[in-house]
């Protein structure tokens, strides 16, 4: 092993593993907010639906970040201070999701809670854009990598715009805000023809 | 490293590692529901038995999924959108287990709680069937792999049937429902002669 | 990759990684029991000492299991049903440690709580003995491996005996029970001359 | 695989992976202290600022340890008892951070809470110094490794001094204590010219 191997792909691998650990914990601790109702009556269970809906949405949201993180890091070639800290910032912003999710669920998708929730979705998209900028500049410069960055940066900007758009729409109805967040989720989950073929997906 | 390595075995490895992380957290946070009783009297401790029984059953259940996931992923050869999202769906359905486990324990294996519990066991078995279908179609096509899929798909269908059967039986007595779940657990834990030899187990 | 690679060292590696994940969560969630006191007065903080002492002891205890698990698994060569399930049983018994630790702390090292605590320490030592028996029979048969098993099985039996001894002693005073547990911890932490040289430790 | 491979780089790798797991959990469970306020009014949300500030500071703090741990372990070459136990001690001291963070947040950066917080920051810096001493003595002895140790040991001693300095300053005002902790964080996060070039960072 050469002296700077930790800054090469092996170092990138340890960052990926650490990020996976943090994301796995974030995605899982959200279920702790699903407190079983005190009574066993079925209507009590139904009253949990806003908490459950918030959980489903946030689970999809964090899972999408994991999938994208996974694909983007394949283009990173070495560890730099900027890579380390933009990644740590991304994980920090993602760690706020369980908080705003439980706030959203407990206040039954209320106005303020929905705006805060959209804000918590906007923050990781900004941190992710910084991280991607770092990887695009310092990582692999192949044709496929550059095409990947071009496509996903555009998709990411559209996502951020939809979160921003959702905030004033929430003043009309929180459901419009939630719809914006749901559209972003579908945008990333559904296989998008050419994009998907590019990513090597064979759905 | 070639440009699409993340879609090969290395990409599969990162999915396995992420799944292991999520499953490790799911299996461990369930113990947080074992709240120590306020009084130190021994009868208070005994009153925890339904919570403890629910924990044992769910622990075995999640452990079985981990073992099967581990064996099945050995037959996956590359990452596709379908593999990613069927796996994420499986982890989502498993993440509901701590909730229904604590519901089951707190309501002392009551009727409604047992039906909900069997339902939470049914969901991952459906997601798992989808994931296995993806791996069977896109993964390794060796004789051993196909035999593995044939055997476990049959065993999986039997498990789903037992969960479904448990639901009406719970209306007779919750213990019949729990018995159905326990039979499924034993079905997967006990070494099953030829199947076990096939899996390479040398117990 | 051959069809049964998952049953070779690669499969052993995934079991190690999963076990590490579960043990990391067990060792860390115990700190969640250290609830900050409501008042900021220093005497309130001091009143946490039994919870803190229980945490220190259990942390050392789980860490020792991790260290031993790490060393013993180096002698495993392939995955069998018995290896999988004895390991899962060991992780289950370890997962009870946070429960009995918080019970011990909340009841200020009381009589019943100490006996339960020693019982929770005894269970993993039995599961560990089974796991070691599996690895000794099916794993590497080198001179070093066999010497390792001989030495640690003896040390493990002594530990189990000390936990058992601690139970009646707790009836005299819980501190005698805690002392037994502490002696076991020191037995494994302190470098023990020849044993340490055998393990390759260079402290 | 030779019989003592687990004591070589592979053994070091498993320690790194376990440490990453524990650090990932520590850094993430702190967010569980951000309880959503009961009312949805915005001023209730603002009242969470001390808890949020404590979270940000501790997140940065634990992240710095992860980054440093990652870089330093690249110079470790084999596993010894001293390496294992100094690392386990470091993880133990870090595991106290969620406790003192929540104490700091709940008591609104009060005097006693700030002193305790600085104390909890001092402990890992002592454990880290011991761990680094072990790796410097037993690890890679290249010019780059020795220069790395020289630089970071000096920076570490300065950090410990700042935590100590913060304690009497807290008696004047808790904000002076928090400022000391923040200065240490900046000291490690900001790229420091020559040091950064040495670490191979290309920010």
Image (tube, coloured by chain):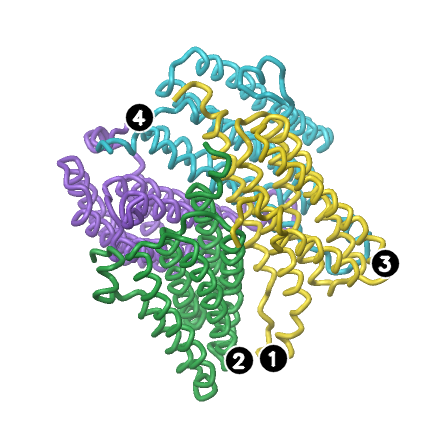
Chain colours: A yellow, B green, C purple, D cyan
Residue indicated by mark 3: A171
Residue B93, image x and y in percent? 52, 63
> Which of the 4 image quarters holds residue D191?
top right
Marks 4/1: CA–CA distance: 61 Å
| Foreground label between 2 and 3 | 3
For numbered disc 1, what is the local secondary structure?
helix
Marks 2/3: CA–CA distance: 39 Å
Marks 3/4: CA–CA distance: 64 Å
Residue C25, image x and y in percent? 46, 49
Residue B185, image x and y in percent? 35, 69
Whether the residues at callouts 2 and 1 have beta carbons within 8 Å, the answer is yes
Residue D182, image x and y in percent? 67, 29
Are the numbered discs 1 and 3 placed on the same chain, yes or no? yes
Residue indicated by mark 4: C203
Q: For mark 1, does the 10 Å Cα neighbourhood hold few (<14), some (14 to 19), or many (20 or more) residues?
A: few
> Which of the 4 image quarters holds residue B186?
bottom left
Q: For mark 4, does the 10 Å Cα neighbourhood hold few (<14), some (14 to 19), or many (20 or more) residues?
A: some
> Which of the 4 image quarters holds residue D171?
top right
Q: For mark 3, does the 10 Å Cα neighbourhood hold few (<14), some (14 to 19), or many (20 or more) residues?
A: some
Residue indicated by mark 2: B112
Q: Is residue B200 left or right of residue A159?
A: left
Provide the chain ID for the residue under circle 2.
B
Marks 2/1: CA–CA distance: 7 Å
Marks 1/3: CA–CA distance: 33 Å
Q: In the rendered view, would you say A12 is above or below B175?
A: above
Residue indicated by mark 1: A42
| Foreground label between 4 and 1 | 1
For numbered disc 3, what is the local secondary structure?
helix
Quick one: quadrant of the C terminus of chain C?
top left
The residue at 64%/29% (across/down) is: D181
């Amino acid at each position: 092993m050469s002296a700077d191997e930790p800054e090469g792909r092996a170092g990138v691998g340890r960052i990926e593993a650490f990020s996976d650990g943090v994301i796995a914990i974030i995605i899982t601790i959200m279920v702790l907010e699903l407190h079983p109702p005190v009574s066993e009556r079925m209507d009590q269970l139904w009253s949990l639906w806003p908490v459950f809906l918030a959980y489903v949405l946030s689970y999809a949201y964090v899972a999408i970040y994991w999938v994208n993180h996974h694909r983007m890091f394949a283009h990173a070639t070495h560890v730099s201070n900027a890579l380390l800290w933009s990644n740590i910032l991304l994980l920090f912003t993602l760690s706020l999701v369980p908080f705003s999710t439980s706030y959203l669920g407990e206040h039954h998708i209320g106005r303020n809670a929905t705006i805060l929730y959209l804000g918590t979705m906007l923050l990781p998209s900004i941190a992710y854009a910084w991280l991607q900028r770092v990887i695009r500049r310092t990582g692999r410069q192949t044709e496929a990598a550059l095409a990947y960055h071009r496509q996903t940066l555009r998709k990411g900007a559209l996502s951020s715009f939809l979160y921003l758009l959702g905030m004033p729409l929430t003043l009309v109805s929180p459901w419009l805000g939630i719809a914006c967040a749901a559209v972003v989720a579908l945008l990333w989950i559904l296989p998008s023809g050419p994009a998907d073929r590019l990513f090597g997906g064979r759905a």
